[in-house]
Image (spheres, rainbow, N blue to C red):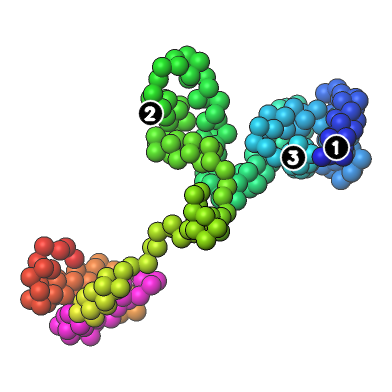
Amino acid sequence: MATDSAADRRMIKIAMSAPYLERQEEQALAFAWRNNHDQEARNRIAMAHMRLVIALASRFRNFGLPFNDLLQEGYIGLLEAAARFEPEREVRFSTYAIWWIRASIQDYVLRNWSIVRGGTSSAQKALFFNLRRLRARIARGDSQLTSESVYLQIANALKVSTADVRNMDARLAAADVSLQAPVAGGGETGTSHIDLLASEAPLPDEEVTEMIDGERRREWLRRALTRLNEREMKIIRARRLTDSSSTLEELGADLGISKERVRQLENRALEKLRAALCEATPAFADLGT
């Protein structure tokens, strides 16, 4: 750990001693990199903005990840920004780079903060990185608010559901635990966490019931399909009984009829099937096609 801290200090010292770039010099270097692939020009731009990487990485220290890793990820984002920067837009490089640096660090935090992966949508990422800050700010305004009231305010601020806020709060508050670890108070031969996981498999009686019901439904469908003529059967199989269903246009071209006629035949075939299934069991009388 002492070695990492020393390395961090050396990196910060070098970054802080790097000279700033004036606008004209920054643009000249950016054009040299983009037009001539001048590696030295790219490296000068990157080194001049390492202060920005350090500042942004410092904001993510409270997630408990090595600061040196945060710096490295930020530097990757900085190099990506340098590779994509368009100097003719006359925007300062720091304004453009800050988004790439932050995104690179945030992705690293999301990948490594917990062995359990969280949501990767923009709303979930915003919730992950802003929940603690918003909760502290709301508490400063009114320390008497209930947890649900705080969750509601955070949900409204970030445009997510209160359930998402509640789940994320629980996730941030809990540390990762091995499923093989024994439950507290279970003793040396006690129950482990994995023993407490609920099985998603159906119960034996449910499996048998589903198997019997499935066979019965397949037999009803087989008998109902015998009511269809050859063209109706072809349409139903192509449209309803395959994983990749054919379009009305494809079937119309195959059968030599219009797609509207295919739709009419499909609807008529479905009505025949519904009538046959209703005859087989009254339970189908309330179901739509």
The reply to whether discs 3 and 1 touch (Cβ–Cβ < 8 Å) is no
Indicate which disc, 3 or 1, sits on the residue closer to the N terminus: 1
> Is residue 15 rendered to the left or right of residue 141?
right
- Asked whether the viewer can see residue 233, the reply is yes
- The residue at the point 19 percent across, 69 percent down is 267
- Tell me if mark 3 has few (under 14), some (14-19) or many (20+) residues whose alpha carbon lies within 10 angstroms of its own: few
In the depicted structure, whether residue 21 falls above or below residue 286 = above
Counting from the top left corner in percent of width and height, residue 281 is at 10, 74
**The N terminus, quarter of image:** top right
- Tell me if mark 1 has few (under 14), some (14-19) or many (20+) residues whose alpha carbon lies within 10 angstroms of its own: few
The reply to whether discs 2 and 3 touch (Cβ–Cβ < 8 Å) is no
Residue 243 painted magenta: yes
- Tell me if mark 2 has few (under 14), some (14-19) or many (20+) residues whose alpha carbon lies within 10 angstroms of its own: few
The reply to whether discs 2 and 1 touch (Cβ–Cβ < 8 Å) is no
Q: CA distance from mark 2 to mark 3?
A: 34 Å
Residue that badge 1 annotates:
2
Q: Which residues are magenta?
A: 219-246
**Any mark on residue 66, and which?**
3
- The residue at the point 82 percent across, 23 percent down is 23
